[in-house]
Each structure stands twice: as C-alpha cells, then as structure tokens.
Amino acid sequence: MIKSEKSPRNLFFVEIIIVLLFFFVSGAIVMKAFATADLRAKKSSICENINLCTQSLCEGYSVKGNIEDTTALVFGEEFSADENGECIIYLSSDCKTVLGSDECIILELRERKEQKASGELCFLTVTFRYDGEEIISAEVSSYTPKKA
Amino acid sequence: MENYKGKSLADTVSSAGSMFLFLLFSVCMLVIIVTASFTYSKISNNFNSTFNTSAVIRYVSNRMRSADSVEVTDDGIILYSDGISVLIWCDNGEIFERSFSGDVPKASGGDKIFEADRLEVIEKDGVYEITVQKGEDIRTALLRGEWGL
C-alpha cells in the first residue's frame, strides 16, 4: 500500500530533476550564445569606429604630411614618432586616446619618408589592432613640395 | 502510526523539493529571458547607431568627394557640380537633400534621406570635419578639402 503510493512521487521527483537538468544545460548554451552575440555586436561597433578613425587619419595625413599634426587634428593631442618612424597610440572603444591597458584598441602608425628632387614624399601605414587581431591596415601618402 | 508519520515526512520533503526545484527553474528561465531581452536591445541599438550615423557620414563624405566644390552655409552644405548642385541640411531630426540648378533654394521641401539629430560640417586646417549625432551617439570623421581643385 505504501509502496504503491511512494513510487509515483519518487518517479515524479526524478523526472523533474532530469527535466531541470536538461533546461539548465540548454540555458547554459543559450547564455553562452547571448554572450557571444553581445561581444560580436561590441566588436562590430568598434570596427565601425575604427573605419571612421582610419578615414580621418588618412585624410588628415594627406593634408598635413606628418604624424604630429595629423594626430593633433584627429585626436586633439599631438603624438610623435620614434627614431624608426613608429608611433603607438592606445584608444578606447570610441577611438579616444587613453592610457595603455589590455582592453584597448592599439593604433600603430609607421611613417616612411623619401626625399625627391622637387620635395618630400611621405608614406603613413595605419594599423589598428583589437583583441590581438589586426582589424584594418591602410597606407596613405602625402607630397610636400620644396619651398622655393 | 510510524508508517503514516514517515509517509507524511516523505510527502512533505518531496513536495517542498519539487516546489523548490520548480521555483529555481522559474527563476533561471526569468534570468535567461531578461538576459535575452537585454542582449537583443543592446545589439539592436548598436546596429541602429552603426547603420545610421556611420551611413550618414559615409554618404555625406562621398557626396562631398564627388562634388566640384563645397560651400558650408548656415542652412547646410551646398555641393556644386557641373550640372546639378545639391543642398544637404538637417532639420527636425531628419536629413534632407535637394537638387537644384541655378540659384540656391531655401532649405525646405527636399527629399528625406536619413534620420539624425545633428549634421555639422566645419572647415578647419584644410579638412572638413563632419559630425553626425543621433541620440547619444556622436560620430566624427575628417575629409580632405582640396580634392579636384
């Protein structure tokens, strides 16, 4: 009598635990998918900011012809290249300059100058890195004629 | 009597356990639904801002590049070309465009091309600074100002 009343309840208890386990596993998978989607959306937004920043840097450099004036124009802050013509700038997700940290966008500027008879030909390579991955790389040139 | 007591305790534990598990299940499902809604709204906002303000900047940049000359006025920007010139302006949360030949028309009655709260073009140091704002999202890009001249 007791057995026959206990068994269905125990069965129901085991059933509900199995169903809950199934839903917890499904929930974990769904949460992981949401987290990935969120990260991708953030990365997509960052890539868009990087694209606009690249445009600004290229357009600015083609007018200014040097890293100092270009960075001052784009970021409102002057950055100088080292003796190898390289300059590394750390940016936040909205492409504003920040102090270096792990979650930053890294902007590498590499400048190369060629002296010509009539003036100076400058090349700037702009490379953006985010999360250890190269997002975009572009090269722009600028020509400054010699002053008479 | 013992059996009856034992049965009652087992029943209570079983019922309470089942209810607790069901409550746990409900809470977890609620958390998942809230997270899903939060993630969706975040993705949707990012998508809107990316394809609104950026699209406006790209559109205006390309129109300015393709024009022979550009004039920035209080009404908006005038893009002069050989045949038909274009006036682009922002009014009441929308960006309008109006083509014309001859005299510059008033900034009214054009075609609505985008939704944006602010479109600002400033000429400084030989470059145009294009700023577009929609809600809290503000994006800026530079454009060389000496093309084709």
Image: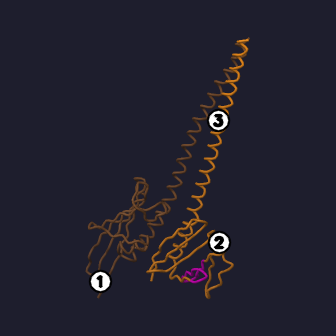
Chain colours: A brown, B orange
On residue A146, the disc is 1
**CA neighbours of label 1 inside 10 A, class few (<14), some (14 to 19), many (20+):** few
Do callouts 3 and 1 mark residues in contact (Cβ within 8 Å)?
no
In the depicted structure, whether residue B149 falls above or below residue A93: below
**Of the residues shown, which amino acid type is indicated by label 3?**
Phe
In the depicted structure, whether residue B139 falls above or below residue B41: below
**Residues shaded magenta:** B73-88
Do callouts 2 and 3 mark residues in contact (Cβ within 8 Å)?
no
User: Where is mark 3, residue-wise?
Assistant: B25
Using residue A87 as the reference point, say whether residue B20 is left or right of it: right
| Residue in the picture at 45% in, 68% down | A55
**Of the residues shown, which amino acid type is indicated by label 2?**
Glu
How many callouts does the rendering have? 3
**At numbered mark 1, what does the secondary structure look like: helix, strand or loop?**
loop
Quadrant containing the N terminus of chain B in the rendered view:
top right
Give the image location of residue A122, x and y in percent.
Answer: 32, 73
Marks 3, 1: nearer the viewer: 3
Q: Is residue A119 magenta?
A: no
On residue B94, the disc is 2
| Residue in the picture at 71% in, 16% down | B5
**Of the residues shown, which amino acid type is indicated by label 1?**
Lys
- Chain letter of mark 1 equals A
On residue B111, the disc is none
**CA neighbours of label 3 inside 10 A, class few (<14), some (14 to 19), many (20+):** some
Spatial CA span between label 2 and label 1: 46 Å
**Labels 2 and 1 in the same subunit:** no
Quadrant containing the C terminus of chain B in the rendered view:
bottom left
Spatial CA span between label 2 and label 3: 47 Å
Give the image location of residue B101, x and y in percent.
Answer: 61, 85
Spatial CA span between label 3 and label 1: 76 Å
**At numbered mark 2, what does the secondary structure look like: helix, strand or loop?**
strand
